[in-house]
Amino acid sequence: MSRDSTLRTFLVALLLCLACSFLVSATAVGLRERQDRNRADAVRRNILKAAFPTELGDGTDFDAFFQSRGVDDLSSFFDSFVIRQAIRLKTGDVAEKPDEYDQLKASRRPGTSSDLDLSELRELDVAGIKRREDVGWVYLVTAKGQPEKVETIILPIRGYGLWSTLYGFLAIDSDSLDRGPTQATVRGLTFYQHGETPGLGGEVDNPAWKTLWIGKRIFDDEWQVLLSVTKSAEDASLHDVDALSGATITSNGVSRMLDFWLGSNGYGPYLKRRASEHANPDRQPSPAAKGEADG
């Protein structure tokens, strides 16, 4: 075969493509475990940002935070301070699920999605999620030195904005919830994945906007969700957060997802059950809740 023949050139190119494909595939397989671990760690960091918004704003040194809690890293913090529970969303009681249970994958499978078919009952699907899983995770952050005392309840939330589904976490002050629905307050809100317009809807990531959520009240005395994003929010408003400038649809999407996940088709039954089981109207407000009340 001639060195300069078309066939030889084709064979060399084919062998080079096959070799490169093999190397890329082998690298992807070899790094998959690390990539999965990095994604899981990113989600867990956002859980902490929702739970500790004043301590863990953007650019915060997580190592210093862990040191202040007497742990070495993210994994040891979750082992020491975070209880993860699987919750049946329809009833609010605790379910048995393996650690590898994936809440989002479950929402896409008919066998693990809710009997309530949100894809057909559109008036109930205010968050635009189409289907809802039967069982969802809840993260309970406990107090330092008091593993039996839950300080913060963190709920995964998701819903459609303008261009994308936003995925995030809402943190609720546990003490305030125990004092009844009208006292329940937000500790923090964060989003870890979305495709909204940078500078507009993408400002859901803006630390200044996320700070506005701290201490906001969530329910009325009948457990109806009052927490919302609105253009007419006042500084003294107990339930309203200022809408994002130039991002009305994204702002409305955030309101709708909160209305869904805090309501009867989301984590509402769990929150009611927990408040009933831990009811204590005489309990003193936590520092976060008291700061809002004093303000």
Image (spheres, grey):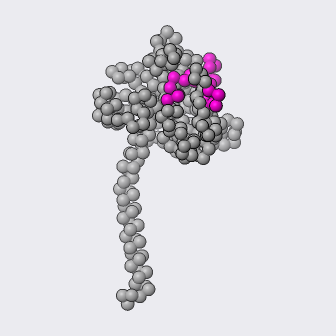
Which range is magenta?
211-233
Q: Residue furthest top?
A: 282
In reply to whether residue 247 is colored magenta, the answer given is: no
Regarding residue 243, the answer to whether it shows in the image is: yes
Within the magenta stretch, is there residue 229? Answer: yes
Residue at the spot x=49%, y=32% of the render?
208
Name the spot of residue 281 as percent of width and height, x first: 52, 11
**Where's residue 28, x and y in %?**
39, 57
Q: Residue at x 57, y 41 (%)?
A: 201
Image x and y of residue 27, in percent = 36, 59
Q: Quadrant of residue 4?
A: bottom left
Numbered marks: total: 0
The x and y percentages for residue 257 are: 60, 35
- Is residue 273 visible in the rendered image? The answer is no
Reply above or below: 201 against 28. Answer: above
Dominant SS in magenta: loop
